[in-house]
Amino acid sequence: MRNDGNLDDPFGSGRPADRSDDTPSTNRLTTFRGLVRRTRFWAPTNPRPGRTKLAVATGAACCLGLVGVSQAGFGAPDRAAVPAPSAEVAERAAVDAASRAMARPSTAPATPTPSASPSATASPKATAKPKPKKTVRQIVPVAGLDRTQMNNAKTIVQAGKEMGMPRRALVIAVATAMQESTLLNYASGVLPESQSYPHQAVGWDHDSVGLFQQRPSSGWGTVEQLMDPEYATKAFLSALAEIPGWQDLPLSVAAQAVQISAFPDAYAQHEWRAGEVVAEILG
């Protein structure tokens, strides 16, 4: 080793190091397979004051440079572990984050989604239109009759329809009642009992009562029955139906065959009026 103020590399090839004064003399850093060998500084035997200071400074710089190279080659050192926050701080942070970022639960009641059903998807049924109320046709008096007479004629026509009698029989019955009672329900002055039933007039022709002036003594029925316009009509039409060929007989002949009246031809005068009344009632 020379003592000329220069540092020799003990691990070098044995050549003298021809370095200028400006080149720091340090021991060479040898790396083998990633391992850094320790570097020793050789102090000169007879150091020069200026070069000694320069060598020490240069050696320190080289050491710092080697440390940087070793860090760059083997990865950056781990960052210093940050001290974990306390449990109270972590809890407050979680609550604060939830109030800002997390969706708050809705307090409104959830609207149920209607499930698909055949009734929901099927086309609505057409609403049935209400049927119009059947109006009863108002029957007006015709042929010179008043309301009471027209109502009695209506009772005769309805009773004949219930029996299934044809229109001709209805006209004969109405014409006969026009002649016998002027279409009024008569009681008899001879039979006080008859006056205890609804009636519209009182007659004195023996014991004849009702619309057709039928006599209880002749077997037409009881006073009570004959004072009922419906019963009296059916009694007359039943007797008419027993006359052979009554449909083809003149009205006066057919009526006289039932009534046996003292004035047989009087019924014919009411035929046209009776036809008008029946037509109004039947509509």
Image (cartoon, rainbow, N blue to C red):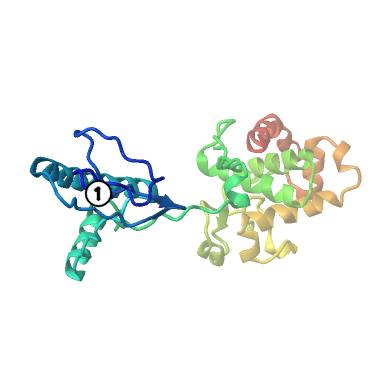
Residue 73 position within the rendered picture, expressed as x and y whole percent measured from the top left: 38, 47
Q: Relative to residue 99, is residue 197 drawn left or right?
A: right
| Dot 1: element | helix
Q: Amino acid at mark 1?
A: Cys
- Which residue sits at x=70%, y=64%? 221
Q: Is residue 129 above or below residue 113?
A: above
Outermost right residue: 244
Find residue 142 and report its image quarter.
top right
Q: Name the residue at the bottom extreme.
A: 87
Look at the picture and state if 116 lies above or below 276: below
**Front residue (pair 125, 55):** 55
Q: Residue furthest left?
A: 49
Of residues 82 and 148, which is closer to you in this image?
82
The x, y position of residue 86, in whole percent, is 18, 68
Position in image of residue 40 (x %, y %):
27, 55
Residue position for label 1: 63
The foreground one among 258 and 129 is: 129
Residue 7 coordinates in the image, percent (x, y)? 25, 46
Q: Quadrant of residue 129?
A: top right
Residue at (60% x, 52% y) in the render: 117
**Observer-nearest residue: 169 or 193?**
169
Residue sitting at 78 percent across and 36 percent down?
251
Quarter containing the C terminus: top right
Q: Is residue 272 left or right of residue 2?
A: right
